[in-house]
Amino acid sequence: MTLSFCLSFFVFAQPKLEETWKDNHLNETLETPLGFLRKEKTTVNKVDYSLGVDKNNKIKYIETNSPTFKVEGYSLATKLFGFKNYTYTRFFEGWGYYLRVNASWCAFFGKAKPTKDTRPIFFFNYNFGKAEGKPVFDSAYEDVLAAQVKAEREKAEKKAKEKEEQAKRRAEYERETERLEKEKAAKEKAELERKQAIQREVEKRRAEEEAKKKAEEEAKQQYAKEVAEYNAKKEAEKKAKEEERKRKSEEFRTGQRVINTELAQGSSSTTATFTESLQGGEKILNETFKLKLKKSLRDYQNYINKNQKRTEAYPLVLVNYKDIMEYSQSELSKITKITSTTVFKKGTKRTEDFKEKGMNGVVIIKVEFSK
């Protein structure tokens, strides 16, 4: 209720057209769409207004460029296409481009044709009557704006590219100049050294040649030694990689270690141990095993006894390499820790070691029993 009262007061407090304004403090005029009027100023709720008053002291025009002013939620920061009714944009000859926001207020965009990103210069309240401006938008107006934006972007990109190419050519010219100067200095130095070498005595030159040959021979020997060491190192690395490849291939052939979270959800006495050891494991068993395997070793054992279809429907489960069916309920309850779980899926070569049982795979669970 308080908010409604404040809004009503704010709207009521704004200056309105056709109200009488008797003050005459300024000796200025204000341009309006249809001419000039006497200019007066007022401030309401921290918003500055400029008023156009006629000879009869009637307010005919209201204008504001205060950043705090808003109408229908729009302000001076709103872009043209941010107005929901932007297609109502009009052009008034001699005045400029404007957009009617509501029955009272309009947004003025200046004398230049606005684009989609143009922001209002000010808001104004004016009764155009039958002199309303001409529509600006047509069916292709958005395409025109898009083309303008594209052309400006291409122009900026072209300018930036030209600037970049100029800088590149300048840098290349400086590098080429520096290179030529270095070559010239190098040639002059080489020529000077050549003339000095010619003047040296023959015996001294022979001694230098011998020293050079000796150094070359030592360099060759050193190079041959380094090549031999390098080849030996590469051969050793190659051999090590081959051994690693064979090892991994053997591990893959015999099965890989995984953790099965299906065993970690039990409700028996071994549930806590399973959860601690198998948490976050990967489910890679076949669908039959995932559907039929119960939530603990004990429940699983009971289920097998009940259905009597173990070989056809379930993998072989070994606890410390001993068939789970060979354990009693009391022995299973003594499991204190599961060290690891290894799963050999159906079809892997390792299951050939368990032909009578485990046609759907083999699960080897290593555990620790309480003494």
Image: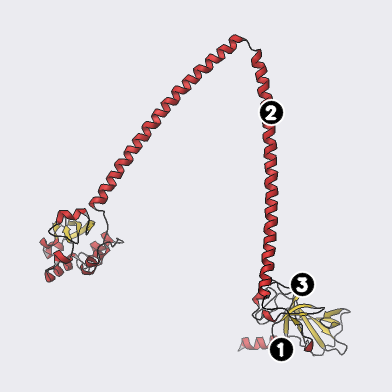
Residue named by callout 3: 112
Label at residue 98? none
Label at residue 12? 1
**Amino acid on which the number 1 mark rests in the picture:** Phe
Residue named by callout 2: 185
Q: Is residue 24 left or right of residue 248?
A: right
Residue neighbourhood size for the residue with mark 2, other residues' Cα within 10 Å, grouped as few (<14), some (14–19), many (≥20): few
Residue 187 falls in image quadrant: top right
Give yes or no for contact between labels 3 and 2 (Cβ–Cβ under 8 Å): no
**Helix, strand or loop at disc 2?**
helix
**Amino acid on which the number 2 mark rests in the picture:** Ala
Residue at 86% x, 87% y is: 54
Give yes or no for contact between labels 2 and 1 (Cβ–Cβ under 8 Å): no
N-terminal-most mark, 1 or 3: 1
Residue neighbourhood size for the residue with mark 3, other residues' Cα within 10 Å, grouped as few (<14), some (14–19), many (≥20): few
Q: Is residue 239 left or right of residue 355?
A: right
Question: In the image, which is nearer the foreground, mark 1 or mark 3?
Answer: 3
Residue 330 appears in view: yes
N-terminal-most mark, 2 or 1: 1
**Amino acid on which the number 3 mark rests in the picture:** Ala
Picture coordinates of residue 348, whole percent (x, y): 22, 55
Residue projecting furthest to the front: 140
Question: Disc 3 versus disc 2: distance between alpha carbons?
Answer: 62 Å
Residue at 45% x, 26% y is: 223
Picture coordinates of residue 152, whole percent (x, y): 69, 63
Q: How is the structure coloured here?
A: secondary structure
Q: Is residue 253 left or right of residue 238?
A: left
Question: Disc 1 versus disc 3: distance between alpha carbons?
Answer: 34 Å
**Is the residue 200 above or below the residue 114 in the image?**
above
**Helix, strand or loop at disc 3?**
loop
N-terminal-most mark, 3 or 2: 3
